Image (tube, helix red, strand yellow):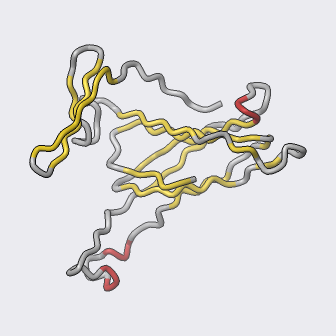
Amino acid sequence: MGVWYPITSGASCTTSGYDGTEEIVLHGDYDGKVFRQEKGNDFNGGDIVSIYATLIWILVMLESVNQSARSTRFIRAEGPLEMNLALSYDWGDYNTARPSTYTQESAGAPTAYGGRNIRLGLCKYDLCRFRKPIMETNVQGSGFSMRATFVTVGTYDLFQSKGW
């Protein structure tokens, strides 16, 4: 079974606007507190919980059971990142065996910017030491369908998931 983290409160209202060219996004919780989003890497001093679940994939032909062997996640992380991966098979049927949760790690890499006056191909600014933006994990399991759930809990730097 996967590791699940309960979400104890959520946003009761949100708003956004611009202060000059800077976008400001605010949300309020049910306790009356107001938070500014996209500022910092924690949530009022605590960990940020992020959960992403894929759609349920039908694994080719329903007449035969298919096996999973590898998870490849394309990540753009600006700093170190640890992500948990939970797989469920056969439309989440609890009678179908589930592998333990997998932990995927990325060392992160700086964000690369390109422009008219910046030449990234020369490695002048030590930009050639990027780590590949891929998190690969050997996985187990088989079924007629599959869903992947990715969870992070922590105060991580900005990251984007580009696909699975």
Horizontally, residue 13 falls left or right of residue 61, namely: left
Residue 131 image offset from top left, x and y in percent: 43, 66
Q: Hey, which quadrant is residue 47 in on the image?
A: top left
Residue 17 image offset from top left, x and y in percent: 18, 39
Examine the rendered structure and indicate whether residue 100 appears above or below residue 13. below
Total tally of numbered discs in the picture: 0
Name of the residue lying farthest toward the top: 31
- Residue shown at 84%/48% (left/top)? 61
- Residue shown at 35%/44% (left/top)? 156
Residue 123 image offset from top left, x and y in percent: 31, 81
Q: Hey, which quadrant is residue 34 in on the image?
A: top left
Horizontally, residue 113 falls left or right of residue 69, namely: left
Horizontally, residue 22 falls left or right of residue 135, namely: left
- Residue shown at 47%/22% (left/top)? 6
In front here: 30 or 133? 30
In front here: 36 or 157? 36
Name of the residue lying farthest toward the right: 63
Name of the residue lying farthest toward the bottom: 122
Examine the rendered structure and indicate whether residue 97 appears above or below residue 63. above
Residue 14 image offset from top left, x and y in percent: 27, 28
Name of the residue lying farthest toward the left: 20
In front here: 31 or 40? 31
Examine the rendered structure and indicate whether residue 12 appears above or below residue 100. above
Q: In which quarter of the image is the N terminus?
A: top right
Q: Hey, which quadrant is residue 8 in on the image?
A: top left
Examine the rendered structure and indicate whether residue 117 appears above or below residue 18. below
